[in-house]
Image (tube, helix red, strand yellow):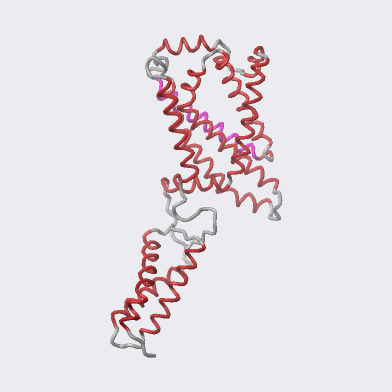
Amino acid sequence: MIIDVQKFVESERTQWESLEAFLKRLEADPDYRMDLAALQEFHHLYRRASADLAKISTFASEQEIRRYLETLVARAYGEIHETREKPHRLKPVDWFCRTFPRTFRRHVRAFWLSLAITLAGVAFGGLALALDPESKGVLLPFSHLQGDPAERVKQEEASLGQRLEGGKTNFSSFLMTHNTQVSIFTLSLGMTWGVGTIVMLFYNGVILGAVGMDYILAGQTKFLLGWLMPHGVIEIPAILLAGQGGLLLGGALIGWGSRASLRARLRAVGPDLATLIGGVAVMLVWAGFIEAFLSQYHEPIIPYAAKIAFGAVELALLVAFLSMAGRKAGKDETLNAKL
């Protein structure tokens, strides 16, 4: 074969550099995943480099170019045909910032169902209290919620945030532990084929709706938002995510449209359930900290507008995180084949 080596190198160099760029990224990040289009391009570049190596091997004088191509093709071959499992390394930040939101999005329909059930409970609780104020004792079986909201607001504002003085750390720990237990319970109720999870979500919605309507009817909407939003915009979605997991578990038990065995369905959904409840626990740690150290301070210490704005920013960041985090490595929930 007779070829012009200089023209040959100039025409193929771009392809070699593209293949080398792929290899550098794969070697720098063992967890990097390619989508189908990237895999096809990588394989095409590998085959082309292999063909170029065969051509250049006939020229004994081009030792440097041949060694470069031999190394390039060998590296690409190793990535394509590698079968050894890479050692597992626990990466908490990577898990929370990538695996958790991806898992949420993969089962987002279960989340929307969890949200719909909760909103139905909110509507029921709010409407029931508005139509029958005497039902408050039944809807809100908690002593601290039985009083007049306006009176409670006066007491809270008069305390100047000193009600929990010296005990905020313990209160924060209690909230984190209690809310995490409730979330785990909500998810585990999926073992009742999802019925228990549905009841729990609806009941939580009823309480939330009744409390909200009670404060709104008393003219304390601003206080309600300033009190709930700093921690509630994280805490409530966390419960919804736990409900998402419970519904996912219930769906696996029922097995609609699946011919897989019950054992296989549960094994398949297990890692995603662990990821969801782990993410929920992290969210509730933050919510407990905010509730103890920020939500309990009211006007005139902290303006309600500032607390509401803080909650709105938190909610926007949470929505962005769950919607977008983890997409960089290549269109999650598509055909992700790992080299």
Residue 178 part of the magenta-drawn span:
yes
From the image, give the main secondary structure of the stretch colored magenta.
Answer: helix
In the rendered image, the vertical position of residue 78 relative to residue 280, given as above or below: below
Left or right? Give the position of 304 relative to 334: left
Residues rendered magenta in the picture: 167-190
Nearest the viewer among 179 and 318 is: 318
Identified at 29% across, 83% down, the residue is 63
Residue 64: percent from left, percent from top: 28, 80
Residue 194 part of the magenta-drawn span:
no
Quarter placement of the N terminus: bottom left
Identified at 55% across, 10% down, the residue is 148
Left or right? Give the position of 203 relative to 223: right
Nearest the viewer among 305 and 53 is: 305
Residue 315: percent from left, percent from top: 47, 33
Nearest the viewer among 74 and 218 is: 218
Residue furthest bottom as drawn: 1
Left or right? Give the position of 249 relative to 161: right
Identified at 61% across, 18% down, the residue is 140
Residue 240: percent from left, percent from top: 57, 35
Q: Quadrant of residue 312?
A: top left
Nearest the viewer among 99 and 260 is: 99
Residue 291: percent from left, percent from top: 45, 25
Q: Quadrant of residue 125?
A: top right
Q: Quadrant of residue 68?
A: bottom left
Total marks placed: 0
